[in-house]
Image: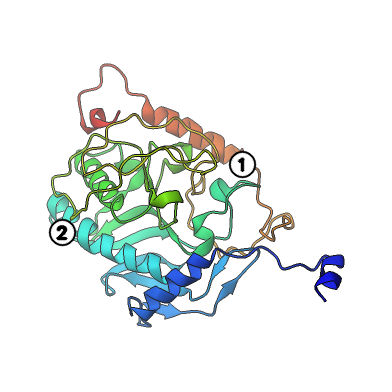
């Protein structure tokens, strides 16, 4: 039978890494995510290709319903749990410090069946497994909004708040990419729980930054250069908050894991031009007008006139 299947080209397709299903099962066994008015279990998502998760949840709010989503998201149990912890331990204390209030709503992107940077080929995005979140903005209880794109180099309070939650995220997630890391993240902060080789973590851009309200953090792993085959560049989590001290990487397509536009994801089923051999939708080329606009914005954001007054931007290398 095996020979017949092989002869007919019916061999099993690509499979998701076993650790993903195990991580979901362990999270559920610990009761870290349950069915609630704001967390709704869904049927398994399987495909196209390796996309999907065994036990997805439709999420309407985080932090026990206190932080709403501008639009509903779809995530796996581990990501919901860690995002909740980060909101409670890092984001809310930072909001109290810089704004004197709490965060009431977040604008995020979640599940999306695609490759990194929406490229035609290459590594599969962690968004394709419900294992990543893109944060575009936050709304405070008093109605004020904080945009990642405008605030990263905008009002001083916004800059300090966003850098504080970024540095804190580096101790909760295994990959964190923010404005300044490359052209694809000029308008959002990407966070995921990918399992990198030898347990490495990646946090970009590298900042010289000590938050006013440091999150509860544990010493990170020692800096090591990853193998060349790893899709991420050689940036590791520092030993402690505020110890980030190297220059941010120049833009390099294909090394990160978020869309150039930073738009909220769809349901991952809208193949545009057929499918690739691995079953994933065939997406648009990596270089598009939107990518060029993103590159121009990234280059503009990294250039500071010599006569500009000193600000928090000078903490960036």
Q: Position of residue 261 (x, y in %)?
A: 50, 46
What is the basis of the colouring in this image? rainbow
Q: Check disc 1 and report the residue beneath it.
A: 286
Label 1: few (<14), some (14–19) or many (≥20) C-alpha neighbours in 10 Å: some
Of helix, strand and loop, which one carries label 2?
A: loop
Between the residue at mark 2 and the residue at mark 1, the CA separation in whole angstroms equals 40 Å
Measuring 54% from the left and 80% from the top, which residue is drawn there?
Answer: 43
Tell me if I can see residue 226 in this picture.
yes
Of helix, strand and loop, which one carries label 1?
A: loop
Tell me if I can see residue 190 in this picture.
no
Q: Position of residue 244 (x, y in %)?
A: 27, 37
Q: Quadrant of residue 77?
A: bottom left
Measuring 45% from the left and 80% from the top, which residue is drawn there?
Answer: 41
Q: Check disc 2 and report the residue beneath it.
A: 101
Q: How many marks?
A: 2
Q: Position of residue 91 (x, y in %)?
A: 23, 56
User: Foreground residue, 124 or 162?
Assistant: 124
Q: Position of residue 245 (x, y in %)?
A: 27, 32
Q: Quadrant of the C terminus?
A: top left
Pointers 2 and 1 in contact (C-beta within 8 Å): no
Instruction: Check the image and name the residue furthest to the top.
Output: 306
Closer mark to the observer between disc 2 and disc 1: 1
Q: Is residue 98 above or below residue 35?
A: above
Q: Earlier in the sequence, mark 2 or mark 1?
A: 2
Q: Quadrant of residue 134?
A: bottom left
């Amino acid at each position: 039978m095996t020979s017949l299947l092989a002869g007919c080209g019916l061999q099993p397709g690509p499979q998701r890494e076993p650790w993903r299903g195990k991580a979901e099962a362990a999270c559920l066994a610990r009761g870290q995510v349950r069915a609630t008015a704001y967390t709704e279990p869904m049927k398994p998502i399987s495909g196209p290709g390796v996309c999907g998760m065994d036990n997805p949840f439709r999420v309407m709010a985080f932090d026990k319903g206190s932080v709403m989503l501008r639009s509903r998201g779809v995530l796996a149990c581990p990501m919901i749990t860690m995002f909740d912890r980060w909101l409670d331990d890092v984001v809310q204390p930072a909001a109290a410090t810089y704004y004197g209030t709490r965060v009431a709503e977040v604008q995020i992107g979640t599940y999306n069946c695609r490759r990194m940077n929406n490229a035609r080929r290459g590594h599969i995005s962690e968004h394709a497994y419900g294992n990543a979140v893109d944060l575009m903005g936050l709304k405070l209880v008093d109605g004020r909004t904080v945009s990642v794109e405008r605030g990263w180099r905008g009002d001083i309070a916004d800059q300090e708040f966003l850098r504080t939650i970024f540095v804190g995220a580096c101790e909760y997630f295994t990959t964190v990419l923010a404005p300044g890391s490359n052209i694809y993240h000029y308008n959002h902060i990407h966070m995921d729980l990918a399992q990198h080789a030898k347990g490495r973590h990646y946090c970009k851009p590298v900042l010289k930054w000590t938050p006013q309200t440091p999150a509860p953090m544990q010493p990170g792993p020692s800096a090591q250069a990853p193998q060349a085959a790893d899709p991420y560049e050689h940036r590791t989590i520092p030993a402690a908050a505020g110890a980030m001290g190297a220059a941010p990487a120049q833009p390099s397509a294909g090394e990160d894991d978020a869309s150039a536009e930073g738009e909220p994801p769809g349901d991952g089923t809208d193949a545009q031009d057929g499918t690739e051999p691995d079953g994933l939708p065939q997406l648009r080329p990596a270089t598009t007008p939107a990518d060029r606009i993103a590159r121009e914005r990234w280059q503009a954001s990294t250039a500071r006139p010599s006569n500009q007054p000193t600000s928090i931007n000078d903490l960036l290398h």
